Amino acid sequence: MERSNAMKPGRLAFSSLFGIFAALLLVACAGPMKTLASNGPDLVRIVENRQATYRIDILPRGHGSGVVVSTEGHIVTAAHVVEDSKGVQITLVDGRDGTPVTYKAQVIAIDKAHDLALIKIDHRFSRPAILEDPANLHPGDGLYNVGYPYNFGEMVGRGNIMRLHFTLRNDDGTTAINDAILADLPDGPGTSGSAIFVERNGRLAGIMSMMLWMTSGREPPMLVRVLVSVEHVRKLLDQAKVPYQSAPPNGK
């Protein structure tokens, strides 16, 4: 799913990061089906955040990523991942024998204006993601994300916040990007809906929405990832009356 728009002097294009392709690795459909080891002190809560991140399989084909935000089984992803789908499934290791179990997910709420969706599965989680206070986010902050690009299985990427509160309008006046975070994370199709965490504290900063690139045609393109701010994630959860863990106002 792609959309494009012209912008002088270069060309600006948008692309979703929702993956549609034949499965290559069956293990990629599951959540953390491996030993979770620490990645060092600079990636705070990396183990917990990997345990809270899952691949979301969309029927009849395709997948995105999502992050657990409540102990009751609520998961946040991108709206374009689940809208118009015939079925949403999440596979995770359930039970003492480590057998993968597939759960059907129910779509609870969608915020199309900010490309957010809230889904739920019938499973309890012990360590959901902790939401950051948006006032604590600043350009230059280090980030990391956990997602499922292509069919590589779970992968971790790192980058930085480039800009906050970015809005872009189309030539006809409609909004193409609404109050988003721009970042330089390395990701590909299948990471739509993946969670972006702050390196220094491991809290949720935003949700991966799309990739944006600019080129003049004479130079390699500039690639930027568009993230839905945690501010809008909080609003969606508040409206749906979903309990979640969050950082205190202006907390460190």
Image: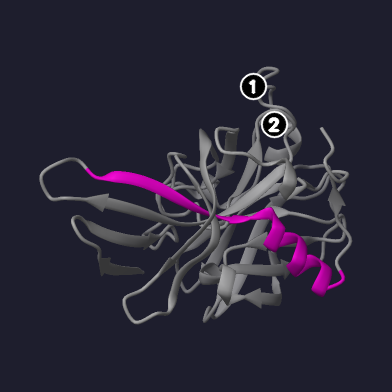
- Identify which amino acid the numbered label 1 is placed on: Asn
Question: Could you tell me which residue is drawn at 72 percent across and 35 percent down?
Answer: 202
Confirm whether the magenta stretch covers residue 109.
no
Image location (x, y in percent) of residue 130: 80, 45
Q: From mark 2 to mark 1, how far is it between C-alphas? A: 7 Å
Question: Could you tell me which residue is drawn at 20 percent across and 55 percent down?
Answer: 10
Q: Which residues are magenta?
A: 221-241
Q: Is residue 3 left or right of residue 115?
A: left
Image location (x, y in percent) of residue 159: 50, 34
Q: Is residue 30 left or right of residue 10?
A: right
Question: Could you tell me which residue is drawn at 81 percent across and 74 percent down?
Answer: 239
Q: Is residue 155 above or below residue 2?
A: above
Q: Answer whether labels 2 and 1 touch (C-beta < 8 Å).
A: yes
Q: Does residue 102 appear in the picture of this structure?
A: no
The residue carrying mark 1 is 39
At label 1, counting other C-alpha atoms closer than 10 Å, the crowd grade (few under 14, some 14-19, many 20 or more) is few
Q: Is residue 94 above or below residue 2?
A: above
- Identify which amino acid the numbered label 2 is placed on: Ile
Q: Is residue 150 above or below residue 139?
A: below
Q: Does residue 237 appear in the picture of this structure?
A: yes
Q: Which of the labelled discs sits on residue 26, or is there none?
A: none
Question: Could you tell me which residue is drawn at 43 percent across and 57 percent down?
Answer: 17
The residue carrying mark 2 is 46
Q: Image quadrant for the C terminus?
A: top right
Image location (x, y in percent) of residue 51: 72, 41
- Residue 56 occupies which quadrant of the picture? bottom right
In the depicted view, which residue is nearer to us: 93 or 87?
87
Q: Element type at marker 2?
A: helix
- Residue 21 occupies which quadrant of the picture? bottom left
